[in-house]
Image (cartoon, coloured by chain):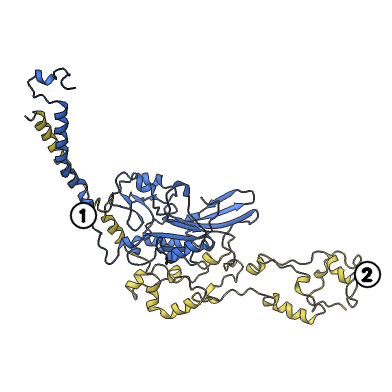
Amino acid sequence: MKVPEQVPRLSAVFAVAIAGLVAARSLLLPETFGKLGHYRAAAIDSVAARPTKYAGQQACAACHDDVATRRAAGNHRGVSCEVCHGPEQAHVDAPLEVKPPAPRDRGFCPLCHAYNPSRPTGFPQIDPVAHNPLKPCITCHDPHAPVPPVVPGECSACHGQIARQKALSHHANLPCTTCHQAPQQHKVAPRTVRPTKPTERSFCGRCHAEGSSGPPEAPRINLAEHNPRYLCWQCHYPHYPEAR
Amino acid sequence: MADEAPQPDGASRGLPVVDRRQFVQEALKACAAGCPVILAVFALPAATAQEPGRGGYDPSEHWYGMGIDIQKCIGCGRCVAACKAENEVPPDAHHFNTWVERYVIHDDGEVTVDSPNGGFDGFPPPESEAGIRRTFFVPKLCNHCANPPCVQVCPVGATFSTPDGVVLVDEAYCIGCRYCIQACPYGARWFHPTKHVAAKCTFCYHRLVKGLLPACVEACPTGARVFGEVAQRATPLARFTRMNDIQVLKPHLNTKPKVYYANLDVEVR
């Protein structure tokens, strides 16, 4: 069969087109494009070759094993060194030239430990305004092994002077909660959240008013006539009452 | 058919007459001859692909994901700071690979979400706790989806999933069209203001190949972030997904995210 004339002509056109495609593809496509998928495989290497800034926990412990041991036994055992000291790869590469920063001011610790209602319940938090103001945290707390915050079981833990006076007074047998209700938050923010105080004369009158049902040895007064302009504790000091 | 057809125009002009059967046969032969050329151009490079050499690191052994425990996040923002330092993210309030959101659900059901400077400087406490029903922090980052919409829309193949399950951007190949930023349902991508390419979380790929953890995981003081292998059984992430009730963000989009949240609230989007 004779090959029709248009077949070789068209073939030539196709051959030129295909050759052009091959040439253009080899020229334009990056070398590694398509090796692993529809992308430049070499891009993975360029991302992987970026420098690291954070050296990692193990790098610190290799030299500072004393601090690492102390930290591993304390409440900051889950806090890696670079959380506070910042990225340390430069320090690892040149230990003497590059010294890691250590945050010593009051501004840093509250990033984690300032009271915030969004924080999970039970995470140790303080009110940075009221909690020993102006003192750097590290004067009382060792950041590498912080002492657990002891929640006071008794009011006397903080209010020792009052407790000692009251123990000598006629009110020695009255627990603090007879007159005060301390919100739980008072332990966290003692100066901003304060316990209650009696707000009415009739409160003291439950024992000290004429005809009240209090213990017989309690001194009695006429509530209506006895300086009615004042609350009792504005004149008497209930933790060490002087009357009788 | 050909016998009944009228004489083709070609015969009157002296050109060779080809009937339909002959033409199809010739065309098929030409195609068969051309196939090896096309295959050689398009298919063979893929067939001869080799793993790029990165001393001792084999991507086929890994399939990465991250776990985040909402109940452990204290909103200190150390992950945000670490990520910015490690990855040289612009230090302004508009570009983040990872950021922390604060959710506040009020008594009337209203939900407010804020993220001042991405949580970089921590969160100031609210002026009043009155009317707040519950509130918590949610760290966010690229979900490194197994079915990533950002990769699908890239017109030039500049963003891709690596064999170990990390979605990366080829900075040398990106044309800066921002399609991927539009396509990401999690808002995890951003446009680099000086490089003029799309940028995103890399799971700190440059650290993974060295056997290190991502910077945000390294910097998390409470262990709220867990990083590791999705598929293997005896790994921290596998334990995390075994021991917790897990949710992912926007599961209905079928992106198959690989960032797994524990104790996630229903209001988190």
Which residue is more in the foreground, B22 or A215?
B22
Image-based side of B191 in relation to A112, left or right: left
Q: Residues within 10 Å of mark 2 (few under 14, many from 20)?
A: few
Secondary structure, mark 2, is loop
Q: Please identify the quarter of the rendering in which residue B6 is found.
A: top left
Secondary structure, mark 1, is loop
Which residue is more in the foreground, B120 or B240?
B240
Whether residue B178 can be seen here: no
Image-based side of A148 in relation to A2, left or right: right
Q: Tell me the colour chain A is drawn in.
A: yellow
Identify the residue shown where x is 26% and y is 52%.
Answer: A40
Query: Which image quadrant: the C terminus of chain A?
Result: bottom right
Which residue in the structure is indicated by mark 1?
B48
Q: Residues within 10 Å of mark 1 (few under 14, many from 20)?
A: few
Q: Which chain is blue?
A: B
Q: Amino acid at mark 2?
A: Gly
Identify the residue shown where x is 21% and y is 46%.
Answer: B42
Image-based side of B149 in relation to A171, left or right: left
Q: Amino acid at mark 1?
A: Thr
Which residue in the structure is indicated by mark 2?
A211
**In this rendering, which labeled residue sits more in front, label 1 or label 2?**
1
